Amino acid sequence: MSVLLQVQNLQVAFDGKAVVHGIDFEIAAGEKIALVGESGSGKTVTALSLLRLLGDAQVSGSAQFAGVEGSPGPVDLLQLGERALRGVRGRDIAMIFQEPMTALNPLYPVGEQIAEVLQIKLGMGRKAAWARALELLVDTGIAEPARRAAAYPHQLSGGQRQRALIAMALACQPRLLLADEPTTALDVSLRGQILDLLDGLQRQHGMAVLMITHDLNLVRRFAQRVIVMENGHIVEQGPVNEVFARPRHAYTQGLIASKPARDVLETPPHASDTASPLLEARGLRVRYPIPRPGLRGWFGRGEFVAVQGADFELRPGRTLGVIGESGSGKSTLALAALGLLPLGDVGGELRILGQKWSKNQKENKDLRGKVQVVFQDPFSSLSPRRTVEEIVGEGLGVHMPELDAAGRRARVVQVLAEVGMDERQFPGFLQRYPHEFSGGQRQRIAIARALAVRPRLLVLDEPTSALDVSIQKQVLELLQRLQRDHGLAYLLITHDVDVIRAMAHEVLVMQAGKVVEAGPALALLDAPRHPYTQTLVRAAGPS
């Protein structure tokens, strides 16, 4: 295959500080390459630098691209003038950004945004561009393309928005597609669908794809070659099968070994059959009131049933995993367990430590100390205006009022030490703010905040989905150790089959508000009976 893009001695710096250090790589025409590394490795910066989308960054080296339409030979992308480069962007080289909700303009229907690319880049008329936009949406597998084209981004699901973004990127049939974490924000089965879509479109159009990702299952499934980056350096590259079978660099070996490992007590001493369940539901039903269309809306509201007749129980020292795609009802189930939904919308029976949530918040005070939550994104769940000491000690004034200031600080220091953070590692850490810590460290702070009041049940809402694979493994190992040491029960909400396999004793599989399959986690994942469960397990890749 002929070389489409040859990058030599690429260097990128911000304010004189280098973040990419003289890397070399090439992409052949029609080739699928994965650029792999953790956050901060320089992989996204590398891709953005090729199209000079980094603002004030200092970029040097060369990027010889042989796919510019009308050019007799390769051109150096890093030396092109801005006007010439605008002609390359979107036409010869297109990019799919990580988060479609921020990449799409919220003020215009998605069809108009796709058509605009065709009008600007190819000079098509308005009517012809709209017709072609519909064809592109059909190619990406969007149902009811005419209706979806007229919809605004917020009216589409995550998968539909990503498909619209792919349609926009492929509008001009580029020679090279840069795909920056195109499936990270999607559920596991949607990831598989988007991957299959990109694979089919790549073969159909013969374009090359540079996939930026930290998902090793995605790399195995999609790419022909892999480039591994660490701290702005390329540490290893080669055919996917060879690199994964015989990784040479320690960093690559660490990434491949970062798959979550199961290290739980299969029969915890706290979880005997005679122990009372900490969490128990019988016929749990949760509804959300919704407006009715037309005149019927004048006389009452309709309802959307988010959870339908769920039965489960969770005993001390055990983890109940709840898995399903967005909209399956798993997060609603967690909110019900936390008592954060109007009681009038929750039917059936739900008991925490033998008690029901009350409309009287004073009666719920003791129960709230026994049930705590760790959210998906530690950065948004921690107040940026509070210090670590204030964040972790926040609940102590309410649930442990007997402690004086010295006692509260001692408890904060103790619980932070339990999650692996102390003064020796982080000097002055009690007075530091969340933005001064990494993602994994922030999640440890969030776990410490939940543990501070000595709960018996933790609701874990996608606790590792925002983290890199190696950090994810560290946080899961921490949660497993804390469960063994304290006999904690976990209600684990996730769409990650690997996390369920590592953490859960029992599992509920939810689809469209219903529990479609339930049972011991390993037995269920090894031999799923329901077609939906089979789809989830298959999409997750080899165990």
Image (spheres, rainbow, N blue to C red):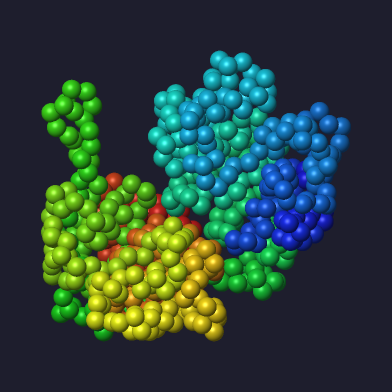
Question: Can residue 3 be seen here?
Answer: no
* Quadrant assignment for the N terminus: top right
Where residue 55 sits: x, y (%)? Answer: 69, 45
Where residue 183 sits: x, y (%)? Answer: 52, 49
Q: Is residue 204 left or right of residue 321?
A: right
Question: Can residue 446 be seen here?
Answer: yes
Q: Is residue 295 left or right of residue 143?
A: left
Residue under the point 44% across and 31% down: 152
Residue sitting nearer the eye, 138 or 15: 15
Q: Is residue 187 left or right of residue 29?
A: left
- As drawn, which residue projects farthest toward the front? 405
Residue under the point 65% across and 62% down: 41
Instruction: Report the label total.
Output: 0
Where residue 246 sits: x, y (%)? Answer: 67, 70
Where residue 233 sits: x, y (%)? Answer: 73, 63
Q: Is residue 348 left or right of residue 324?
A: left
Residue sitting nearer the eye, 2 or 291: 291
Residue under the point 41% across and 40% down: 157
Q: Is residue 268 above or below residue 48?
A: below
Residue sitting nearer the eye, 305 or 49: 49
Residue sitting nearer the eye, 522 or 95: 95
Residue under the point 83% across and 31% down: 71
